[in-house]
């Protein structure tokens, strides 16, 4: 087994093998592996293939050099395994029906983490590397009794359907490799452990330290005279789906919080998400009030919302944003839920945002999936896309978040956001409006904090919505709520290409590891469960992986506009389908220019030049002290040193931003060159 | 009847008291103060307050704090905030609770709060009137604009031209303009020879057989034909083609294939034996073996289709508030699909990709055939060249291409654009469709282009101005005729010009209308700076000489095909119908046997393989070298666009820039924050200053840092490139460096004869692509010549950059 050169530089156990970037990410990206020392390297990476995030691994090819090596090792035909990854089964003579290149014959290997298919039919070798967490279901296709080949369809959560077939096994006792696959793809259903608990990779960064609620609230200036941090939920007694640290109005004692909790569905009381640094207008989130058919009221709840309003001296109004369509909200009364009546809540205005529920969203994405994989019908593409309503849902979510951000920023008014339970649409709305309002969340670390806070700690039910390791693929609780949110973020990055520190690959990587079950971050449903399962102790955080190789995820166009509020345009005319995610498996969608690679080079160049500038400045300082009265300067006017030299320029392009350029200017002084300036320009 | 607030005096450039710099002879009809102009995303959103003007020529807007323009600078037809009256399509006044389409005869019953101008080029200008805006002025200017803008009727074009270019000074100015020598105009024989040489097409020659347009009315004076065909032989060929548009050479692929275009065959003509030999020689060009005729009729949209699609697209994108029908957001995608505009773009790009793939295999002749050879063959032939030849992806190369394949080839600009509203049946924005196709290529391969989308947008907008000789004729013959009696064009129709004095009757000396390529006439330097990428696309181009890339890549050469095989490519399949070309069927059966091997379909698979190659290039195996940044990039590898549904995007910057309610794609900017580019420029300048302080003291031993040996001979040129790059971003804020007003006045009267050294924009830009340039930019280093006015500049970053 060849060892990657990067093992030592990471400072991990010398014997541990590196994770493969590609294999971790079910995805995408075989990226060129030039700086093997800085990141978990990728076995399958290849210099010859485009490195953009949009690229599908199905067609990943090995570079010539490694292909040769692979040939030598081809008896084994193994990918580089992760720490504690073990091979469970191997089978030769399997046909993979690639919808793009045709049938390929090769070998399948199943480990406790992945499915690995390799075919030498093509040169370079064709490989398919699929984390088992991505598998939604495995179905046997065709007549089981026939003696012909047996075919299997592996339906993936990331829009793919892979079809394999192999000869009917003569030995009836031996299980098909795809039955082995099913066992390890659904560990939860089979009494096994999710691979994240076994994966023991050590990264230089510890992602579990990214989010600390106390310091995050401190960053926002909390506690202050109106808001306090309460420990009432320390043992999850007030609300088991909320985090232990909550921020509530100062003048509401803990005892009263409990009475408010009784009135709110699942005890999810209104708590602070964000406070405007100047106007003190706040974004608070909660679940629906349990009004019911009889129109129940709660004095405590009414007083509580009044307290939220009073905490903001700028406005004498409070906006309650109910994410649901009003019909649905009314229908919830039948089930004991409902919405705040404006009679009961003085000075509050209720707004319905018309966002549909998880079932509608799941159906919409299913339609989209049918539309884009494997083949796309060109002639009716746009009307077909319209009929999925996916972009319309995206638009409604963005529009809702925009209204919230606008009320807080322009109206200086506090808002309360809820849907039914306050963990799906509410999380989408609060986190998107926070992204618009606060530039901190648009940095890489800030975004991680945002996810940890609004999604993970406030109990978005990742386990239920994604169904990690669970074979029950038709579970009605599954829904692409989080994918939809990331799509909305992507739409924002398209409209404001320089406002985000992270790039598209960052978003794709998050979604890939949402499914991969390699990291513990997206396991479980709530903070309480995560603590109980000792997730931070027993698993690795996806942020460890990401923060250890930030250069992969950095947007070189980023300009820090932290105080700027983003107001995106939410017209459908300006939204696009995120083809870099949804259609990335189609090789015909491969972008024409290796933008990701070039951006990385750009960043490296910038760092290198920055270093040189610093060196030169130090050198200059040194010289200054030595020759302070160098009369040469007086005698020789600057004109002899005026020629500017072009050191290196790189153009690239993202979206429609025209080009990015790094430039060094060298100044010719008398008879030697010196000095360098770098800069990136976004034109 | 019109009130003239400000009549510019003869001989002096006038300046309206509120800061509008009038063109010579231009008079302000109405002015409204305290107006706010809504800014588009491109301009940074929000609004600008200033003064709104209406003249005979344009609606102009001058922002309050705009820097005083240099009175002595050359006139620019349109400022950044201006709109020509001729491009206005609709004037809509928005009142407190209603909107009204304002026509020349309509009367307003309310004071508009907002004035929206819908333009033919899909821009929408929106002006807001404050409470502070005098009501009378608001109503007046609305009426004035409604009355003065060019309602679409025959004859109004002349008045418009006069308003813009009719003054004596303007004529004088225009006659002194020199043509851009960086581009090939394809007007003279030597222009064509230059192109032949550039392409290494040695076996072709320029023929002046059509010098007097006797052979073909619509072809240009000079056409390129095979070396071996004599003019006398050639003459007999014209009759066999529709309108006499015989196969002519357009371009040679570096691997040795030739691209030809021709009109359809005339079937009803008796073919004599000699004719046939000549015809074949012309058609086969310089390739002996193989000719593929690409029929453009059946898969591409007709001009009428394009017209319909474009008008639907306009209606959809403009979202005209005065009309009650507007497309709801949730029907946007299907309505967009229903316009078929994107379908048509796809089919053009697909056809051009097919042709490019044929050409790159080498050693065959591809002849584009269209019935008239004046519409879609312009689109396809020029798209092929943009895809295959990096030269045509530069601004000047592209301009030459439009000259070659559109202007000289006789695209009926005049009829297709229909400025005069004479023949609606003929109207069709074929050229705009082409620009959108180029935009798609640019969008998918931005770093392979030297020109930018800004350039394409500027060209798109200029098409709608009936001012340029480029677009005002249908062919070279007409253009020549027109320029002989320009006097007619310049006859004043409104009569207002009579005031200019008796010498205005000396029409015979009138200069011809300017070509569209005279960008300095239309756009400010800041806009023009954006026409090209600030740095060269990689890799730098080597000059083609005699087909020096003529290495045959394809091992399965197609030469094994019988000599003289003609195939027809249609709907992606090759056939060899007996009557293609028509002279081969019928009476000349004996001829076929004696001269040529019988037609066979043997090499059809070979050709189909070429086409398949294009479908397969989308797979990584084939594109690996093209996309890998390290692999040697063949600059002549065609840019084959992705054409799947999700890859066809809308040119939002063009079609949706008017949708004021829906603007995005800008970086957040607010008034008190500098634009990111300005901020970066500032930072660069700071670093420069620091380095300037450090560098003279730097010791020889610091050489090690930058020991990279530089070529001292080339660094001058490089420095010019650098400075164009660095300062392009800074220019908007700084005064025009060496020619600042103060310097000028102190030097004495400004003389037209000795203009101070002006930076020649085109020179250094050109040099990006060809390594070095003869034109060194004369912009002196700001450190030695700080503009005197620099310290008085309002913007702090402006001064810091120039000091």
Image (cartoon, rainbow, N blue to C red):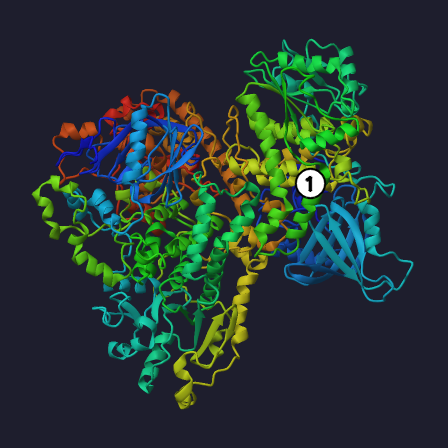
Q: Is residue B345 above or below residue A209?
A: below
Percent position (x, y) of residue B705? 43, 35
Percent position (x, y) of residue A566? 53, 29
Q: Is residue B569 above or below residue A45?
A: below
Along the line of sight, the residue nearer the viewer: B194 or A318: A318
Name the subunit of mark 1. Answer: A
Along the line of sight, the residue nearer the viewer: A183 or A630: A183
Q: Residue at x 19, y 56 (%)?
A: B483
Q: Is residue B794 above or below residue B193?
A: above
Percent position (x, y) of residue A617? 43, 27
Q: Residue furthest left?
A: B502
On screen, residue A265 versus residue B796, left or right, reads: right
Name the residue carrying label 1.
Answer: A361
Along the line of sight, the residue nearer the viewer: B623 or A62: B623
Q: Residue at x 41, y 24 (%)?
A: B671
**Residue B397 makes an appearance in the image:** no
Q: Residue furthest right?
A: A173
Percent position (x, y) of residue B341? 47, 53
Along the line of sight, the residue nearer the viewer: B609 or B516: B516
In which quadrant of the rendered view does residue B261 lie?
bottom left
Q: Is residue A412 above or below residue B287?
A: above
Can you say which quadrant of the picture contains the N terminus of chain B?
Answer: top left
Can you say which quadrant of the picture contains the C terminus of chain B?
Answer: top left
On screen, residue B215 versus residue B121, left or right, reads: left
**Residue B188 makes an appearance in the image:** yes
Label 1: state its secondary structure.
Answer: helix
In which quadrant of the rendered view does residue B122 lie?
top left
């Amino acid at each position: 087994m060849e060892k990657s050169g990067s093992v030592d530089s990471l400072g991990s156990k010398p014997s541990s093998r590196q994770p493969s970037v590609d294999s971790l990410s079910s995805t995408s990206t075989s990226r060129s592996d030039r700086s093997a020392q800085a990141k978990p390297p990728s076995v399958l990476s290849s210099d010859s293939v485009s490195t953009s995030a949009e690229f599908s691994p199905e067609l990943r090819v090995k570079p010539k050099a490694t292909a040769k090596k692979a040939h030598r090792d081809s008896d084994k035909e193994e990918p580089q395994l992760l720490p504690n990854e073990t091979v469970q089964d191997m089978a030769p003579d399997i046909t993979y029906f690639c919808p793009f290149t045709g049938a390929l014959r090769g070998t399948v290997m199943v480990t406790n983490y992945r499915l690995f298919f390799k075919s030498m039919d093509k040169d370079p070798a064709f490989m398919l590397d699929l984390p088992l967490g991505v598998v939604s279901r495995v179905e046997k296709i065709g007549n089981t009794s026939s003696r012909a080949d047996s075919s299997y369809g592996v339906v993936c959560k990331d829009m793919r359907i892979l079809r394999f077939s192999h000869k009917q096994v003569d030995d009836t006792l031996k299980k098909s490799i795809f039955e082995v696959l099913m066992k390890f793809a659904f560990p939860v259903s089979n009494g096994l452990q999710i691979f994240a608990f076994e994966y023991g990779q050590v990264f230089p960064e510890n992602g579990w330290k990214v989010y600390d609620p106390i310091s995050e609230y401190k960053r926002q200036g909390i506690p202050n005279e109106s808001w306090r941090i309460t420990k009432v939920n320390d043992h999850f007694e007030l609300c088991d789906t909320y985090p232990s640290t909550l921020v509530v109005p100062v003048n509401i004692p803990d005892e009263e919080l409990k009475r408010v909790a009784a009135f709110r569905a699942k005890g999810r009381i209104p708590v602070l998400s964000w406070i405007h640094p100047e106007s003190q207008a706040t974004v608070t989130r909660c679940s629906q009030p349990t009004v019911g058919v009889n129109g129940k009221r709660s004095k405590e709840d009414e007083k509580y919302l009044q307290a939220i309003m009073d905490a903001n001296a700028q406005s004498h109004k409070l906006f309650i944003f109910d994410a649901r369509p009003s019909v649905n909200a009314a229908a919830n009364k039948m089930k004991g839920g409902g919405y705040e009546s404006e009679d009961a809540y003085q000075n509050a205005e209720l707004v319905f945002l018309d966002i549909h529920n998880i079932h509608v969203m799941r159906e919409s994405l299913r339609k989209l999936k049918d539309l884009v994989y494997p083949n796309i019908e060109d002639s009716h593409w746009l009307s077909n896309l319209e009929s999925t309503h996916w972009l319309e849902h995206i638009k409604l979510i963005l529009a809702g978040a925009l209204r919230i951000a606008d009320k807080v920023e322009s109206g200086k008014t506090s808002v309360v956001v809820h849907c039914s339970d306050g963990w799906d649409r509410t999380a989408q709305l609060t986190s998107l409006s926070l992204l618009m309002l606060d530039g901190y969340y648009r940095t890489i670390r800030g975004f991680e904090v945002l996810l940890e806070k609004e999604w993970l700690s406030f109990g978005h039910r990742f386990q239920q919505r994604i169904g990690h390791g669970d074979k029950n693929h038709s579970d009605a609780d599954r829904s692409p709520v989080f994918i939809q949110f990331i799509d909305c973020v992507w739409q924002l990055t398209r409209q404001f290409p320089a406002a985000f520190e992270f790039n598209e690959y960052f978003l794709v990587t998050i979604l890939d590891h949402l499914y991969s079950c390699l990291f513990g971050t997206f396991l479980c449903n709530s903070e309480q469960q995560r603590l109980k399962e000792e997730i931070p102790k027993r698993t690795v955080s996806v942020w460890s992986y990401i923060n250890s190789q930030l250069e992969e995820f950095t947007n070189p166009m980023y300009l820090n506009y932290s105080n700027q509020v983003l107001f995106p345009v939410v017209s459908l005319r300006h939204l696009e389908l995120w083809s870099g995610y949804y259609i990335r498996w189609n090789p015909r969608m491969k972008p024409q220019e290796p933008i990701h690679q070039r951006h990385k080079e750009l960043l490296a160049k910038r760092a290198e030049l920055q270093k040189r500038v610093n060196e030169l400045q130090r050198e200059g300082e040194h010289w200054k002290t030595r020759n302070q009265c160098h009369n040469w300067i007086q005698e020789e006017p600057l004109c002899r040193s005026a020629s500017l030299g072009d050191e290196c320029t790189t153009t690239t392009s993202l979206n429609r931003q025209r080009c990015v350029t790094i430039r060094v200017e060298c100044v010719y002084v008398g008879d030697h060159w010196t000095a360098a300036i770098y800069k990136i320009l976004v034109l | 009847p019109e009130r003239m607030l400000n009549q510019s005096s003869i001989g002096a450039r006038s300046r309206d008291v509120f800061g509008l710099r009038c063109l010579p002879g231009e008079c302000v009809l109405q002015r409204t103060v305290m107006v706010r102009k809504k800014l588009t995303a491109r301009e940074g959103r929000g609004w600008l307050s200033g003064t709104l003007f209406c003249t005979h020529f344009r609606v102009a807007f001058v922002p309050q704090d705009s820097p005083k323009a240099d009175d002595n600078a050359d006139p620019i037809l349109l400022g950044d905030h201006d709109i020509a009256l001729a491009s206005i399509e609709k004037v809509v006044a928005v009142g407190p609770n209603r909107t009204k389409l304002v026509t020349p005869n309509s009367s307003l019953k309310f004071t508009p709060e907002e004035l929206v101008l819908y333009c033919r080029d899909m821009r929408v200008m929106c002006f807001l009137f404050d409470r502070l805006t005098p009501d009378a002025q608001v109503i007046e200017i609305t009426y004035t604009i409604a009355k003065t803008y060019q309602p679409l009727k025959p004859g109004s074009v002349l008045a418009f031209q006069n308003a813009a270019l009719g003054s004596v000074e303007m004529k004088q100015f225009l006659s002194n303009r020199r043509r851009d020598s960086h581009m090939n105009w394809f007007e003279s024989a030597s222009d064509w020879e230059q192109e032949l040489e550039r392409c290494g097409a040695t076996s072709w020659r320029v023929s002046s057989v059509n010098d007097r347009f006797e052979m073909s009315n619509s072809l240009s004076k000079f056409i390129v034909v095979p070396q071996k065909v004599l003019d006398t032989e050639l003459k007999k060929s014209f009759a066999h083609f529709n309108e006499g548009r015989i196969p002519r050479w357009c371009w040679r692929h570096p691997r040795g294939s030739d691209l030809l275009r021709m009109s359809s065959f005339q079937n009803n003509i008796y073919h004599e034996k000699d004719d046939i030999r000549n015809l074949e020689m012309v058609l086969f060009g310089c390739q002996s073996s193989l000719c593929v005729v690409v029929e453009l009729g059946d898969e591409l949209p007709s001009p009428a289709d394009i017209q319909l699609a474009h008008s639907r697209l306009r209606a959809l994108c403009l979202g005209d508030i005065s009309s009650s029908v507007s497309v709801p957001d949730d029907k946007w995608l299907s309505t967009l699909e229903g316009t078929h505009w994107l379908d048509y773009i796809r089919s053009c790009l697909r056809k051009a990709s097919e042709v490019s793939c044929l050409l790159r295999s080498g050693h065959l002749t591809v002849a584009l055939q269209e019935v008239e050879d004046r519409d879609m063959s312009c689109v396809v032939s020029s798209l092929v060249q943009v895809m295959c030849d990096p030269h045509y992806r530069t601004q000047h190369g592209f301009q030459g291409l439009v000259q070659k394949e559109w202007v000289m080839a006789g695209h009926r600009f005049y009829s297709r654009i229909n400025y005069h509203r004479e023949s609606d049946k003929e109207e069709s924005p074929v050229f705009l469709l082409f620009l959108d196709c180029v935009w798609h290529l640019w969008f998918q391969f931005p770093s392979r282009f030297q020109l930018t989308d800004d350039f394409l947008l500027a060209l798109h907008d200029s098409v709608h101005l009936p001012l340029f000789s480029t677009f005002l004729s249908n062919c070279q013959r007409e253009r020549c005729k027109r320029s002989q009696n320009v006097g007619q064009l310049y006859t004043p129709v409104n009569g207002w010009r009579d005031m200019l004095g008796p010498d205005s009757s000396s029409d015979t000396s009138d200069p011809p209308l300017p070509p569209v390529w005279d960008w300095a006439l239309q756009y400010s330097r800041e806009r023009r700076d954006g026409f090209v990428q600030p740095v060269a696309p990689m890799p730098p181009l080597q000059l083609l000489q005699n087909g020096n890339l003529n290495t045959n890549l394809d091992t399965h050469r197609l030469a094994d095909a019988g000599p003289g095989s003609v195939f027809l490519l249609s709907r992606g399949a090759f056939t060899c119908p007996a009557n293609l070309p028509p002279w081969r069927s019928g009476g000349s059966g004996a001829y076929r046997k004696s001269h040529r091997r019988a037609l066979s379909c043997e090499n059809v698979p070979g050709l189909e393989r070429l086409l398949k190659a294009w479908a397969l290039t989308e797979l990584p195996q084939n594109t690996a070298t093209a996309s890998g940044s390290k692999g040697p990039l063949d600059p002549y590898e065609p840019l084959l666009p992705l054409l799947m549904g999700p890859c066809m995007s809308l040119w939002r910057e063009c079609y949706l820039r008017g949708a004021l309610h829906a603007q995005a794609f800008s970086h957040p900017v607010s008034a008190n924050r500098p634009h990111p580019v300005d901020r970066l420029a500032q930072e660069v300048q700071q670093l420069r200053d620091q380095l300037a302080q450090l560098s003279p003291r730097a010791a020889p031993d610091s050489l090690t840092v930058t020991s990279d040996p530089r070529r001292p001979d080339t660094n001058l040129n490089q420095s010019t490139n650098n400075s164009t790059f660095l300062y392009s971003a800074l220019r908007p804020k700084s005064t025009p460096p060496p020619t600042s007003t103060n310097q000028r006045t102190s030097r004495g009267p400004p003389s037209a004869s000795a203009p101070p050294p002006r930076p020649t924009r085109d020179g250094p830009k050109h040099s990006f692509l060809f390594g070095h340039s003869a034109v060194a930019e004369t912009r002196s280093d700001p450190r030695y010549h700080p503009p005197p006015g620099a310290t008085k500049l309002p913007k702090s970053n402006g001064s810091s950059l120039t000091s």
